[in-house]
Amino acid sequence: MPEPLFETVTPRLGLPLLFAGQAQKEGYVNEIATRIDSLLFLAIEGQADTPPTDPDDGTSWLIGSNPVGAWAGKAGHIASFQAGNWLFSAPFDGMRLLDRSSGQEIRHIGQWTIPQRPAVPTGGATVDTEARAAIAAIVASLTDAGIVPAA
């Protein structure tokens, strides 16, 4: 095959590219469709280091920092179970996903960023009930938006 004019995969999602005269294009097209299916509007079942024993096709997980088994060496990647196989996708800045287990949105900026729930104020010498109510409403809104986890 002559030198390609561009790389063999796309730079962000690693989707395989097709070339003129390439044999068995359907394999590449199917891989492209599978990767898009697993990454578009991404929702994970949760975060784990160990692959589930009997995953359903089309489900995805965020691999933790100490992966084992089929996930070994893939810390921080997205593992999607497609057609009986694990498909791994490296994260990139700007990637967002919904963690179904917590209802929270997680984003990648150099690393996976998971916002923590701020504490609602308690105690103190002077109690300002209006300020506390406003802070509690802000925390509730952040929770409803999936930005911070529920209590």
Image (cartoon, grey):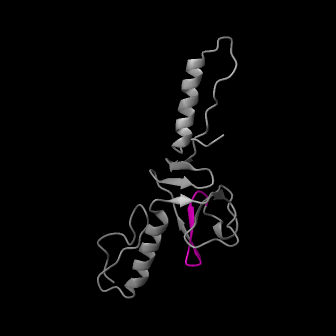
In reply to whether residue 15 is colored magenta, the answer given is no
Q: Which residues are magenta?
A: 75-86
Q: Describe residue 18's horizontal placement relative to residue 101 as left or right.
A: left
Q: Is residue 111 visible?
A: no
Quadrant for residue 129, please give it.
top right
Q: Residue at x 29, y 72 (%)?
A: 5
* Rendered location of residue 112, percent (x, y): 55, 49
- Residue 10 image offset from top left, x and y in percent: 38, 66
| In the rendered image, the vertical position of residue 58 relative to residue 106, given as above or below | below
Residue sitting at x 51%, y 61%: 90
The image quadrant where one finds the N terminus is bottom left
Q: Quadrant of residue 118?
A: top right
Which one is in front, 7 or 150?
Answer: 150
Does 61 sit above or below residue 137? below
Q: In the current view of this chain or complex, which residue is farthest to the top?
A: 125
Q: Position of residue 96 (x, y in %)?
A: 48, 52
Q: Residue at x 61, y 39 (%)?
A: 116
How many marks the image carries: the answer is 0
Residue appearing at x 55%, y 30% in the figure: 137
Residue 94 is situated, as x and y percent measured from the top left of the image, at 44, 50
Image height of 32 relative to 66, above or below: below
Residue 151, image quadrant: top right
Q: Nearer the viewer, residue 43 or 61?
A: 43
